[in-house]
Image (cartoon, rainbow, N blue to C red):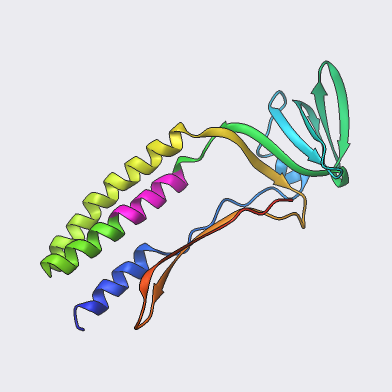
Amino acid sequence: MKRLVPLLVLLLALTATAEAQELAGTFDQLRVLVKPGDTLTLTDAAGQRVQGKLADLSASALELEVSGTRRRFHSGDVDVVEKRGSDSLKNGALIGLSIGAGFSGTALALTTQDWAYAAVGALLYGGIGAGIGAGVDALIEGRRVIYARSGAAQTSFHISPILSRSRKGVLFSVNLGTP
């Protein structure tokens, strides 16, 4: 039992809750994420998707150049704005670090009963996991949501430990909120 407590503390520290990046909820916040000329895909309140290059953005309206014609969308008419680009390397590195360090640290602690050896192994395999996670994220490119109108559903990702007398493990939860 004495050795189980440090192991559980290590597991809790490595599996802290992680959440996805916050989205812009106003056009003012969106200005930080885009620049004129960026290709955006927006979904309006009617569910229609429009793709074009950003021509202008103000606090109340967004203008896209679609097939040579400028189209103006007011903030109340836009539900979601997506931008094509690469995925952030940070979340992949953190997930890889958590998985590599968590599993290897736990396995080494249980098999060797040597906490120093387990900590070194967790750091080593955590670093390897972080590298693999960042590498996988570098390969992912696609549209990602950068703006969701206030009240629209948002995607979130959670990792949390499950610890009880009868169960031990990790709970992965993904909420793919669709506006």
Q: Residue 114: x percent and y percent?
A: 12, 67
Taking the image as shown, residue 138 lies to the left or right of residue 65, namely: left
Taking the image as shown, residue 138 lies to the left or right of residue 80, namely: left
Question: How many callouts does the rendering have?
Answer: 0
In the rendered image, the vertical position of residue 165 relative to residue 30, given as above or below: below
Q: Is residue 96 magenta?
A: yes
Based on the displayed image, in which of its 4 quarters is residue 101 positioned?
bottom left
The residue depicted at 76 percent of the width and 36 percent of the height is 42
Single out the residue that lies furthest toward the front: 166
The residue depicted at 78 percent of the width and 39 percent of the height is 43
Q: Residue 130: x percent and y percent?
A: 34, 46
Tell me the chief SS of the magenta region: helix
Q: Is residue 36 magenta?
A: no
Q: What segment carries the magenta color?
A: 90-100
Q: Where is the N terminus found, in terms of image quarters?
A: bottom left
In the rendered image, the vertical position of residue 38 relative to residue 159, given as above or below: above
Q: Nearer the viewer, residue 168 or 61?
A: 168
Q: Residue 83: x percent and y percent?
A: 65, 34
In the rendered image, the vertical position of residue 51 relative to residue 123, given as above or below: above
Q: Residue 106: x percent and y percent?
A: 24, 64
Taking the image as shown, residue 52 lies to the left or right of residue 132, namely: right
In the rendered image, the vertical position of residue 74 relative to residue 114, given as above or below: above
Single out the residue that lies furthest toward the top: 68
Q: Nearer the viewer, residue 66 or 111?
A: 111
